[in-house]
Image (tube, rainbow, N blue to C red):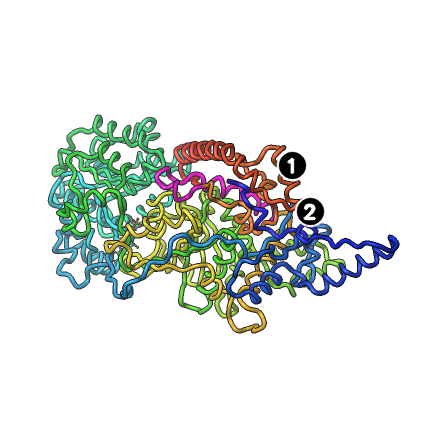
């Protein structure tokens, strides 16, 4: 895996490739002079840079016919950089990285050479009009159903209309409200992302508890009050989701303020949660871990009256390893249930399981928690569809109006392509307001956040460098920068997205991942939600499920999700409740292309609405343009790439971040679910090319990827091979088995660690 063929893809020193001319005869002085002259002539004729050489070669050989000799490539170092830019600014004394740029271990490879071709040809497209796809998760405004004629009280329906501006139910709400008001059987609610599942279970639940209040007694206006007992528990996998559900619930209960709801989700002192439980609640929103804790240790938590149990985001609850907790909760609720003193309270408990996907783990959760459950779907006709039953169990649906595309992008071009895509996206003000970019793990998010928010204004940098030389204290400058950051975000999670901002359309960058403290995550999400400016959030899967972030127009999966379920949830952050939305996923040529089949499964029509693009297309659009006619898009792209590589080299802090991000990314790559690992085969991953997309010039072997690092002997061989320009092909075959074992072991450990991480004490700290 790791280094295979890498040397073929990197520019290699002249001395390696060009046979040295032999000068015979004369004195040694004559021979030396002749040799020098000859060398001088060659260097004059030759373009100063491998990129330019490659371009020249390409223009002379437009059909790319294989020539007998290898193209002239040179190992480029800082000093031979063809673009002749002034040396990058160095603030604060010698801030060069430990590894000197002239270190032979560093290579500058050409962006546009040796990239693998896409394996699967583009399928011919039928003429279709994606724009006409009717939203499948929108409120049914044209339909006959209103909240009132579904059985909700006029009071509640009026509240929804006037205070919450909800005019009509969505399809899943129509089905579930009807069912859950009428019958007491357990239910499994399955519907697309953004179809309003939260209200689909909250509205009938609140209505049922409101109905208990109809008969007034002599002591109070209403029969139900906070001391009447806990009637419903809603479980969700993360604090963010619990808070979101709780906000929606509080909004509904403003028309029935005698019904009291509360949360126990951790993140505050247990004492305060206990006090809340002691005061009395009628509806409780909780995370499973915290509820188990209170069931075991809080006497005041009386669950004898609980008649509704909701398991929201069922698949995530299982993915996060809550199976045992949920089993325990169900058993305790069964064991502690008693007849209620409140008239009208049902004798049996209704359990409702909610999920956008129906995978094996959700079915298992159903087995644990549901008895004779009714399957509630948005489109009831689906239930009779015998043919698709088997397939559907395995699959998922995406909102029909969501326009999805995939980009086949070779590893080396990933970073530039993402940048170009976002540049293009935010070129015009107002076309896209909010975009979410999903990445594999926290380190990758942090690195890209720094990279995209870095100050690209070289002139400004140069000036500040001069000022520094003039005696400006480095600390002052740092303070200024910090001050600017602080103004935007006290937590360092919000910064200007300079890489894709334009003077007329500044873009605000956010970052979010599970390693950030809870309060920072909440503040960052809040800022992104409220923002009325164009903004991008770079995040891990921590933001993929259930979060209802308003007006997200675009979702980019820069790193494909670790499971197709996650993919569904990620793209479900856009195209919500009938709104338009776009999603783009980056796939590398090779085995990753097979993922397109999974993308297609999300559509009823087999994925006709899917479109395909590639790196060149994206780069032309993002880096093209007419501002400088002398430079074509390839040159501009290369300029940008070299610029970020220099930025990383010049800043040890960022170089370290890039290396860490690279390492973590490779480790994370090995954790794709086993069913999908053939599409994300780490053995096919070209680490040398991948390093380029982290702005690294290091050879991958030197980046110390845990579990992937070659032994000392191998390292030496690599070095020798690199210096002598001998491609490591021979070793490739020998190396493969051991690398595979090491990789598998790394993958196993990583998965174990992630599981532990997810189900451990801090259930929210998803990487
Ligand atoms: N009938 C309705 N009319 C208009 N908006 C609605 C309606 N029902 C729900 N919404 C809004 O739709 C948004 C999405 O709802 P919700 O989060 O419940 O979707 P979901 O199906 O649970 O999505 P996910 O599967 O991603 O969790 C919310 O902002 C909610 O206020």
Q: Is residue 259 visible?
A: yes
User: Residue 363, how many percent across, how many down?
Assistant: 24, 37
- Give the main secondary structure of the magenta stretch: helix
User: Residue 17, how many percent across, how many down?
Assistant: 66, 52
The circle on residue 716 is: 1
Single out the residue that lies furthest toward the front.
25
Mark 1 packing: few (<14 Cα in 10 Å), some, or many (20+)? few
Mark found first going from the N terminus, 2 or 1: 2
678 inside magenta stretch: yes
Identity of the residue drawn at 47% across and 42% down: 517
Tell me: residue 152, above or below residue 515.
below
User: Residue 764, how many percent across, how many down?
Assistant: 41, 39
Mark 2: C-beta under 8 Å from nearest atom of ligand 1:
no
Q: Nearer the viewer, residue 341 or 560?
A: 560
Q: Mark 1: which secondary structure?
A: helix
Residue range corresponding to the magenta coloring: 655-681
Identity of the residue drawn at 62% across and 62% down: 53
In this view, the mark in front (2 or 1): 1
Give the number of marks.
Answer: 2
Q: Mark 2: which secondary structure?
A: loop
Q: Nearer the viewer, residue 614 or 515?
A: 614
**626 lies left or right of 653:** left
């Amino acid at each position: 895996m790791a280094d295979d063929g890498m040397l073929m893809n990197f520019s290699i020193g002249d001395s390696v490739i060009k046979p040295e001319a032999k000068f015979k005869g004369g004195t040694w002085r004559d021979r030396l002079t002749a040799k020098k002259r000859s060398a001088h002539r060659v260097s004059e004729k030759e373009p100063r840079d491998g990129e330019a050489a490659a371009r020249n070669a390409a223009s002379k050989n437009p059909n790319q016919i294989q020539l007998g000799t290898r193209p002239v490539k040179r190992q480029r170092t800082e000093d031979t950089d063809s673009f002749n830019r002034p040396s990058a600014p160095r603030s604060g004394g010698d801030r060069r990285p430990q590894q000197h740029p002239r270190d032979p271990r560093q290579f500058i490879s050409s962006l546009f050479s040796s990239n693998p071709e896409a394996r699967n040809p583009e399928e011919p497209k039928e003429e279709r009009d994606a724009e006409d796809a009717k939203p499948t998760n929108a409120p049914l405004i044209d339909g006959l159903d209103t909240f009132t004629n579904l059985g909700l009280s006029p009071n509640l329906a009026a509240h929804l209309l006037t205070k919450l501006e909800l005019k009509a139910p969505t399809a899943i709400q129509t089905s579930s409200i009807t069912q859950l008001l009428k019958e007491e059987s357990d239910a499994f609610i399955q519907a697309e992302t953004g179809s309003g599942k939260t209200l689909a279970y909250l509205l009938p639940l609140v209505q049922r508890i409101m109905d208990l209040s109809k008969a007034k007694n002599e002591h109070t206006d209403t029969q139900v009050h906070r001391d009447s007992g806990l009637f419903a528990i809603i479980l969700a996998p993360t604090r963010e989701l619990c808070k979101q559900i709780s906000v929606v619930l509080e909004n509904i209960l403003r028309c029935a303020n005698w019904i009291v709801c509360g949360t126990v989700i951790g993140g505050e002192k247990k004492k305060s949660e206990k006090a809340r439980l002691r005061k009395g609640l009628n509806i409780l929103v909780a995370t499973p871990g915290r509820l188990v804790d209170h069931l075991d240790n809080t006497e005041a938590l009386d669950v004898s009256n609980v008649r509704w149990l909701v398991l929201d985001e069922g698949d995530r609850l299982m993915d996060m390893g809550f199976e045992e907790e949920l089993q325990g909760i169900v058993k305790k609720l069964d064991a502690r249930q008693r007849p209620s003193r409140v008239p009208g309270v049902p004798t049996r408990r209704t359990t409702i399981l909610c999920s956008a996907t129906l995978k094996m783990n959700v079915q298992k959760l159903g087995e644990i928690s549901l008895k004779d459950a009714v399957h509630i779907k948005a489109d009831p006709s689906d239930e009779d569809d015998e043919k698709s039953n088997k397939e559907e169990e395995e699959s998922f649906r995406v909102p029909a109006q969501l326009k999805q595309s995939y980009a086949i992008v070779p590893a080396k071009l990933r970073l530039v392509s993402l940048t170009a895509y976002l540049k293009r996206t935010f070129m015009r003000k107002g076309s896209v307001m909010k975009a979410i970019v999903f990445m594999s793990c926290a380190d990758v998010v942090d690195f890209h956040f720094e990279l995209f928010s870095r100050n690209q204004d070289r002139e400004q940098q140069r000036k500040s460098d001069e000022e520094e030389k003039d005696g400006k204290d480095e600390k002052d400058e740092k303070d200024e920068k910090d001050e600017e950051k602080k103004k935007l975000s006290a937590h360092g999670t919000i910064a200007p997205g300079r890489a894709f901002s334009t003077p007329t359309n500044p873009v605000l960058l956010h970052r979010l991942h599970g390693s950030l403290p809870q309060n920072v995550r909440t503040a960052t999400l809040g800022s992104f939600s409220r923002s009325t400016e164009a903004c991008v959030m770079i995040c891990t899967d921590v933001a993929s499920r259930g979060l209802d972030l308003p007006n997200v127009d675009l979702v980019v999966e820069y790193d494909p999700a670790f499971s197709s379920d996650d993919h569904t949830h990620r793209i479900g952050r856009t195209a919500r409740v009938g709104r338009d939305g776009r999603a783009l996923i980056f796939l590398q040529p090779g085995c990753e292309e097979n993922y397109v089949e999974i993308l297609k499964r999300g559509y009823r029509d087999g994925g006709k609405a899917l479109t395909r693009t590639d790196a060149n297309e994206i780069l032309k659009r993002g880096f093209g343009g007419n501002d400088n006619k002398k430079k074509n898009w390839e040159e501009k792209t290369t300029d940008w790439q070299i610029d970020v590589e220099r930025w990383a080299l010049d800043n040890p802090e960022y170089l370290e971040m890039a290396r860490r991000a690279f390492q973590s990314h490779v480790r994370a790559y090995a954790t794709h679910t086993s069913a999908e690992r053939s599409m994300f085969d780490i053995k096919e991953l070209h680490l040398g090319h991948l390093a380029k997309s982290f702005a690294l010039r290091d050879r991958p072997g030197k980046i110390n990827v845990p579990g992937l690092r070659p032994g000392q002997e191998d390292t030496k061989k690599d070095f020798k091979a690199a210096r002598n320009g001998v491609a490591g092909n021979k070793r490739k075959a020998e190396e493969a088995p051991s690398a595979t074992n090491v990789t598998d072991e790394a993958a196993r450990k990583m998965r174990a660690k992630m599981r532990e991480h997810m189900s451990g004490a801090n259930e929210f700290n998803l990487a």
